[in-house]
């Protein structure tokens, strides 16, 4: 922990408090003369020192705030070496669906869910992939949370890259079948987790291929986060719902069969805590290694200004000096 000042010379503004202190001393001196002439008792020591102390406190706090003190901290960044996570986000056109033309789309909510999940799994290397009718890795598992967030925010968009199919519903869960054998996870890694963020709308697909692929060892655990709600529509640039969009009638069965084939668990977007707990349970615990340090910074000036309101209030209450 280290305390530094960005503009130390600005702290000299505290010397401005000498002027009202001098005026207060002059006023007190005159007051003593008047009380002596009239034979009046003077104020007690507490009442006499209250206002000068408030003036000094106000000047010191404002001077410190002007100097812009910054508290810098540094903590170790630890990460598991025996476990990794891949987050695969559905980028098919149905992920444009929303409750209204101004409401967050499914893809918007998927991105938020992915970043919240990544924050909850802070000690694990996490990567990002997208899929429609084919998967695409964008970021291989890393402990760098900023890299993950930047990839999710900047590299993910609807049908980027375009799907092979031109059908209205292009998502097919067997697009995820290559993940266990295509080098998404390094050889010899003990624990692996695939988190699928999707609206669950899929055309018919080869369930047997998925079952066979995810039966490979070491096993990949699967958690699905479903971002969808009934009544959502895909809205065009004019704000009107597109008549061509209709959820596939086999969507619910497709997700159920995918979960059965992968032994996965599914959670709604409003139960992200359940998804995190399932992820933690699947990955268990393991040794962590130090990968460097994470620096933090806290600006203290706003708190000093807030604290200055206390002596200022006392001065305003005794403003007749």
Image (spheres, rainbow, N blue to C red):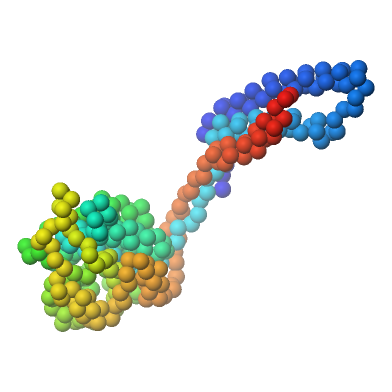
Q: Classify residue 45 as left or right of residue 95.
A: right
Q: Is residue 102 left or right of residue 277?
A: left
Locate residue 106: give its quadrant. bottom left
Question: Residue at position x 25%, y 51% from top?
Answer: 102
From what the image shows, is residue 158 above or below residue 278?
above
| Coordinates of residue 302 in the picture (x, y in percent) | 54, 39
**Residue drawn at (52%, 49%), measured in percent from left and top?**
73
Quadrant where the C terminus is found in the figure = top right
Task: Identify which residue, 134 or 187, lies in the foreground.
Answer: 134
Q: Is residue 47 left or right of residue 136?
A: right
Location of residue 203 in the rendering, given as x and y in whole percent from the top left corner: 13, 72
In this rendered view, identify the residue nearer to me: 313 or 114. Answer: 313
**Residue 27 in the image: x percent, y percent?**
78, 20
- Please, is residue 267 above or below residue 27 in the view? below
At x 44% / y 67%, what residue is drawn?
288
Please provide percent x and percent y for residue 101.
Answer: 22, 53
Left or right position of 153 against 320? left
């Amino acid at each position: 922990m280290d305390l530094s000042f960005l503009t130390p010379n600005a702290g000299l503004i505290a010397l401005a408090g000498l002027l009202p202190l001098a005026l207060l001393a002059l006023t007190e001196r005159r007051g003593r003369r008047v009380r002596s002439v009239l034979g009046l008792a003077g104020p007690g020591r507490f009442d006499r020192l209250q206002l000068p102390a408030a003036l000094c406190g106000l000047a010191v706090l404002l001077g410190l705030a002007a100097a812009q003190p910054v508290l810098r901290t540094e903590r170790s960044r630890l990460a598991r070496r025996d476990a990794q996570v891949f987050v695969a986000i559905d980028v098919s056109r149905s992920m444009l669906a929303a409750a209204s033309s101004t409401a967050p789309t499914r893809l918007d909510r998927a991105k938020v869910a992915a970043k919240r999940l990544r924050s909850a799994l802070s000690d694990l290397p996490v990567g990002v992939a997208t899929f429609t009718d084919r998967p695409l890795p964008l970021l291989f598992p890393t402990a760098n949370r900023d890299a993950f967030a930047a990839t999710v925010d900047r590299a993910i968009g609807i049908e980027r890259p375009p799907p092979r199919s031109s059908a209205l519903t292009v998502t097919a869960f067997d697009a995820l079948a290559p993940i266990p054998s295509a080098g998404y996870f390094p050889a010899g890694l003990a624990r692996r987790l695939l988190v699928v963020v999707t609206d669950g709308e899929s055309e018919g697909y080869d369930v047997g291929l998925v079952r066979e692929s995810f039966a490979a060892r070491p096993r990949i655990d699967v958690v699905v986060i479903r971002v969808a709600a009934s009544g959502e529509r895909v809205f065009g640039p004019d704000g009107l719902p597109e008549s061509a969009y209709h959820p596939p009638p086999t969507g619910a069965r497709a997700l159920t069969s995918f979960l059965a084939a992968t032994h996965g668990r599914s959670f709604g977007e409003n139960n992200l805590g359940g998804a995190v707990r399932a992820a933690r349970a699947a990955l268990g615990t393991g040794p962590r290694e130090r990968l460097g340090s994470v620096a933090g910074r806290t600006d203290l000036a706003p708190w000093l200004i807030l604290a200055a309101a206390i002596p200022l209030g006392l001065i305003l209450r005794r403003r007749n000096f």
